[in-house]
Amino acid sequence: MAPTSTTRRRLALTMLLVVALMAVFVVKLVDIQVVRASELNEASYGKRAVGVTTYGPRGDIVDANGQMLAGSIMRYDAQVSPMMAMEADHKFAAGEGTENVLDTAAKIGDITGQTPAEIVAVINDALAVDPKSNYAMLIKSIDLDQYRALDALDIPWLFFTTNPGRTYPNGAVAGNLVGFVGTDGAALEGLEWSMNSCLAGTDGEEVYERSLDGVRLPGSTVTTKDVVKGGQLKLTLDLDLQWYAQQALAERVQEVGGTHGMVIVQEVKTGKLLAVAEYPSVDPNNVEASAVEDRSSRAFRDVFEPGSTFKALTAAALVDAGIAEPTSRVVAPYSIRMPNGADFHDSDWHPDEQLTLTGVLVNSSNTGTALFGDKMDDNVRYDYLQKFGLGQKTAVDFDGEASGMLHPVEDWDNQTKYATMFGQGLSMTAVQVASSYQALGNGGVRLPVQLVEGCTAADGTVTDVPPASKGTRVVSKAAADSTVNMLENMVTKGWLNNVLPIPGYRVAAKTGTAQQADGNGGYGSLYLVSLAGMAPAEDPQYVVSVNIANPVTITSSGAAAPVFQKVLTQVLKMNRVKPSTTPSPDLPVH
Amino acid sequence: MNGNLAYDWATERTPRDLSHAFPAPSQPGPWQDSRPSHITIAPTRLQRKARPRVVYALIAAAGIFGIIASQLLLSVATSQAAYEIASLEGQATALSRTWQSLTVELDSVASPQNLAAHAESLGMVRNTNPSVFLRLSDGAVLGHPAAANATAGSVIGAGDLVPNSLLTQKKTQSQKAKAAAKKTNADSPAAGAAAGTAVIGVNPPTAPTPAVGIDLSKTSAPDTASAGSLVPLQGGLPSPKTH
């Protein structure tokens, strides 16, 4: 039977519909498989995959022996969900829960040190702003023990995030140099700040797929960014000596009623700083406890007129130029008016006396120094002072380091011309004073001051090592050695010869009591008392410079002397320096 | 993996099947249509060999099945290991945290402030005199031996003047944490015995007025250890053995 036209039409219509339907499917298929393929793939991957930041820790700062001064530690922030806490409380009020929030808060407070009232206030404050609040910071930067104790409480509305922090196991030991970082981990002060490029780590990122129950699928981890750990910064400091110097200095500054002080210990043969002790010094773990002005390094940033310790430099220049010898003599009066009109006097009254150059140093005579110094041309003396490092930052280039003030010769007035011979009318940092004495101890060669040994990156490469230097010759070896000999006579014959000597060792030192500028172009009533010196004098190994500012009970360098003697003894002991075999030379004073 | 296998198998067989499985075309003859032929085509050895055999099929099927089964087992083992890895990684993290925390604690306990305080609490003082050396070659004593002075030798006699907040902080915090942990363990069965008086939050359904009552007497005072007893020395100092 032949199909009727109606059947044929139905058939055609059906076919048409089937084709149309197929066409729709094909379009959709192409849309999903081709047009939006990448977008959909990504979305599906995004549901399975999670990205995590892997923490790249900040590098440690260690002393010369590798003992840690600053290190990184993971800390934890505890947060609460105020809404969940409220629900838990309501549940308890309705007789369902096991504990009300106040009791829970008391348990939390036992661990965090907060009162339950404070914790409840955090919750209520957040709820007052937003009744559906799911986040409120309870306490930041708790340590591991606290975190574990809190975690063990198993409180459903308490949760934690990690917060990398910084720790300074030795507290204020070298705190002024090490500096500190802020609560957000950003470097703020000291070496933490200036060496940030060495210390900072780079966080990495990785992506992995995880199962429904959160387990990482094997083989799905893709590292999108590599973790770079921060480098280790090694200093030249000795932790124990640094502490000892800080302790001895702090004790003495408090005793004499001073405002602050600095002790520098430098190795003569290398220029390395073994200790840069300061009082007051900041505890980087607790920066808020220190006044703002005590949070940085005075030894590098503060300048002062050095006073009589400076006479040793003038004497060395005179001997080097052949103008004077340790036994050359002048007649030093108590007070003097120089031909150019400048007048000044010694600290204590005395009749006119004949003094050798040694005697000028032993008695710390200003008039004697001026009479000797007058024999040298100002420009020549200026060149010597520059070579001693005045007016320039040291090679350490500490963050914010001061260069000190050495005016050009043409700016010297009649008073300054002479004042610069005995350490007034110019300014230095404590480190510069130590560095100039290092030159005297090292046979007249001043070495660059070194604080940083180097930065060892995570891959083992070492950077930031100061370039090797043969130093600058300031004076001849003979001139340097005879200056040291004169300074030995200051220890054996000077007025502090009951405090300064160290039995068995030859010690060379010079006192200083410098009147400080009052900020109005004149001198105030406050002094900076100091002592700078070295031992063993026959072959100097260590320079120690002690500076105490504005002492009240003892306003002479007698205030600084015990610290000098203690620290120098400790340095000699620590480094097993053999006792001297020869006595100090006996140079005539008169 | 299965797809690959099937493909290899097919390509292996295909050329032989096509070239040898069919008889070569013969010359057409007039008798072929009228009567049955007495001659049959004898397959060559090659052709006979090329025929699929049941045993091969079985081997192939068993192979596929074996591979599927081992893959299944393998993925079961892998996912099992994934859980093990996850748990071990968790342990490693916890241990490295403990290690880090203990290292830092050790470093702060090893700080000179702490050591000096403990040494002096044991009655040790520093000898203010410089070192004395004994030269072995001739037995000469270098330096001036002198006994230490108890008062002059005290380094921290005037108090510890180099602050270290880690020492004080650590002491109080860890003790608090430990005390609290102990307390929780002891309390946990009896927790919730006290009736709640404080109500927290905005407009609670059961309480008419939102009030926060704090009973401060509940909080216990923090335990503080006596100063200078961070690390108790147990058993005294070891006695030196000299020969």
Image (tube, coloured by chain):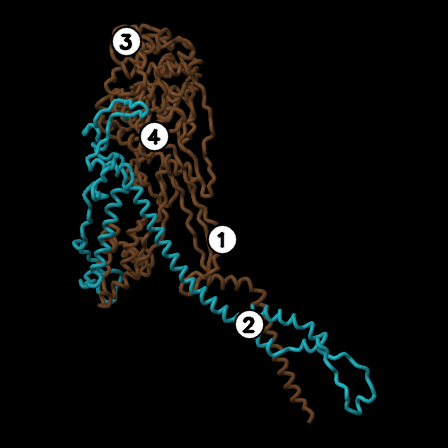
Chain colours: A brown, B cyan
Instruction: Report which residue position mark 2 lands on.
Output: B63
Mark-to-mark CA distance, 2 and 4? 78 Å
Q: Is residue A554 above or below residue A16?
A: above
Q: Amino acid at mark 2?
A: Gly
Instruction: Report which residue position mark 3 lands on.
Output: A334
Same chain for the residues under marks 3 and 1 in the image: yes
Mark-to-mark CA distance, 2 and 1? 40 Å
Mark 3 or 1: the one toward you: 1
Instruction: Report which residue position mark 4 lands on.
Output: A276
Q: Is residue B132 left or right of residue A184?
A: left
Mark-to-mark CA distance, 3 and 2? 114 Å
The circle on residue A437 is none
Same chain for the residues under marks 4 and 1 in the image: yes
For mark 4, give the secondary structure.
Answer: strand
Chain designation of label 4:
A
| Total tally of numbered discs in the picture | 4
Mark-to-mark CA distance, 3 and 1? 78 Å
